[in-house]
């Protein structure tokens, strides 16, 4: 799910690219006029990207160097500062100086505002929580192990006839202790996955829950349609109002690679790769062009060295990366 701040950044990067048409400038005016939230996102993105023009390098660049001479006349008032110094091969990477931080303050607020109040409240009251970039294995009261991925939270209730887990956010892989009299149930969104003794992971992605089985059998249901029975090596998914179904596109072979400190991708769209990398870093990463977002990526990357991933993208895809302290734009 792309939040308004990401949409504003993507649109502005496009307008600063030199390839934008007059209709795209007009469309941006229409987009930002949709609501006060759209206007705030547009203004904050303008301040954020405009901060690049305050660096010593960018101050020597001219806006006309950033655009095609035939389209320069249509640049609106928002294009008062160059996004970054341009060269014939495209955008160049450089790091801004301290003066850029003033323009980034609003972006911090947007990043926080991107979380729903209910989600923040639920995480605050969860029994177990990992922050962004934190990973933890927990032994539960019944002897089961819960392997928590980055930015995850869940609570437990083992007081009744079933061992119940409420997954609030993120992803957890459960190595379930066998107890035939007390099924192990993980509730996520409006559904649940039940097992007795097995190894399976449950992950929340926006409005979708995914259940991946590594050992044993897991039954998934959400009150819509029949329950889905998953065996080892299968992944199921469900959304509100849609019955659980097998996810045939799942790459089971690389599932759980984060437990080994790695992210593994096999011919995955760059947009998918960046969405996964985003889970492991607090800075915002935005892919600002559809053609770049659809490029295929294959590789093994260390979570602790995600800069290697960005460098590989530049070297192998022809995309360009602009890095700020709190924001990275891939264009």
Image: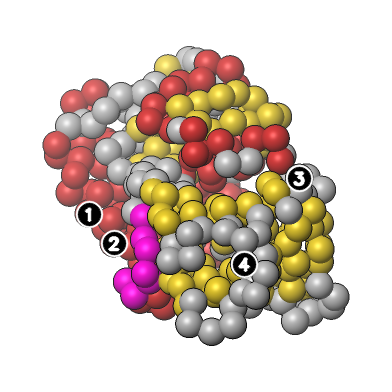
Which residues lie in the magenta part?
Answer: 124-130
Residue 317 visible in the snapshot: yes
Are the residues at dot 1 and dot 4 in contact (C-beta closer than 8 Å)? no
Q: Secondary structure at mark 4?
A: loop
Residue carrying label 2:
109
**Mark nearer the N terminus (3 vs 4):** 4
Residue carrying label 4:
179
Please name whichever residue, 116 or 189, is drawn nearer the observer in this view of the structure: 189
**Dot 2 crowding, Cα within 10 Å, few <14, some 14–19, many 20+:** few
Q: Position of residue 224 (x, y in %)?
A: 79, 79
**Mark nearer the N terminus (1 vs 4):** 1
Q: CA gap, disc 4 to disc 2?
A: 46 Å
Are the residues at dot 2 and dot 1 in contact (C-beta closer than 8 Å)? yes
Against 39, is 250 above or below?
A: above
Of circles 3 and 4, the one toward us is 4
* In the image: residue 147, left or right of residue 185: left
Are the residues at dot 3 and dot 4 in contact (C-beta closer than 8 Å)? no
* In the image: residue 102, left or right of residue 320: left
Of circles 1 and 3, the one toward us is 3
Please name whichever residue, 328 or 38, is drawn nearer the observer in this view of the structure: 328
**Mark nearer the N terminus (4 vs 2):** 2
Which image quarter: residue 194? bottom right
Please name whichever residue, 304 or 135, is drawn nearer the observer in this view of the structure: 135
Q: Secondary structure at mark 2?
A: helix
Q: Position of residue 30 (x, y in %)?
A: 54, 65
Residue 289 visible in the snapshot: no
Residue drawn at x 48%, y 15% is: 88
Q: Position of residue 173 (x, y in %)?
A: 55, 52
Q: Position of residue 204 (x, y in %)?
A: 57, 61
Residue carrying label 3:
233
Residue carrying label 1:
105
């Amino acid at each position: 799910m792309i939040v308004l701040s990401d949409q504003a950044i993507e649109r502005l990067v496009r307008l600063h690219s030199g390839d934008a048409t007059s209709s795209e400038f007009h469309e941006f005016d229409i987009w930002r006029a949709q609501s006060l939230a759209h206007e705030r996102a547009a203004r904050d993105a303008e301040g954020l990207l405009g901060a690049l023009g305050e660096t010593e390098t960018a101050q020597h660049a001219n806006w006309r160097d950033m655009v095609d001479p035939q389209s320069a006349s249509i640049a609106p008032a928002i294009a008062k500062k160059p996004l970054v110094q341009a060269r014939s091969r495209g955008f160049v990477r450089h790091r801004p100086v301290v003066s850029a931080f003033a323009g980034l303050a609003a972006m911090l607020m947007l990043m926080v505002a991107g979380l729903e109040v209910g989600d923040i409240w639920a995480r605050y009251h969860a029994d177990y929580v990992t922050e962004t970039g934190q990973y933890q294995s927990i032994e539960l009261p019944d002897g089961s192990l819960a392997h928590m991925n980055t930015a995850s939270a869940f609570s437990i209730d083992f007081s009744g006839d079933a061992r119940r887990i409420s997954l609030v956010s993120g992803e957890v892989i459960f190595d379930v202790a066998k107890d035939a009299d007390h099924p192990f149930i993980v509730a996520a969104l409006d559904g649940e996955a039940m097992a007795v003794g097995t190894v399976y992971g449950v992950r929340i992605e926006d409005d979708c829950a995914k259940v991946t089985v590594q050992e044993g059998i897991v039954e998934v249901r959400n009150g819509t349609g029949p329950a889905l029975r998953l065996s080892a090596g299968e992944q199921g998914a469900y959304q509100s109002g849609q019955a659980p179904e097998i996810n045939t596109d799942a790459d089971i072979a690389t599932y759980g690679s984060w437990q080994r400190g790695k992210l593994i991708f096999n011919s995955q769209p760059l947009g998918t790769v960046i969405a996964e990398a985003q889970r492991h870093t607090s800075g915002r990463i935005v892919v600002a062009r559809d053609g770049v977002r659809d490029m295929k990526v294959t590789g093994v990357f260390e979570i602790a060295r995600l800069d290697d991933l960005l460098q590989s993208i530049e070297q192998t895809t022809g995309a360009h990366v602009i890095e700020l302290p709190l924001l990275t734009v891939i264009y």
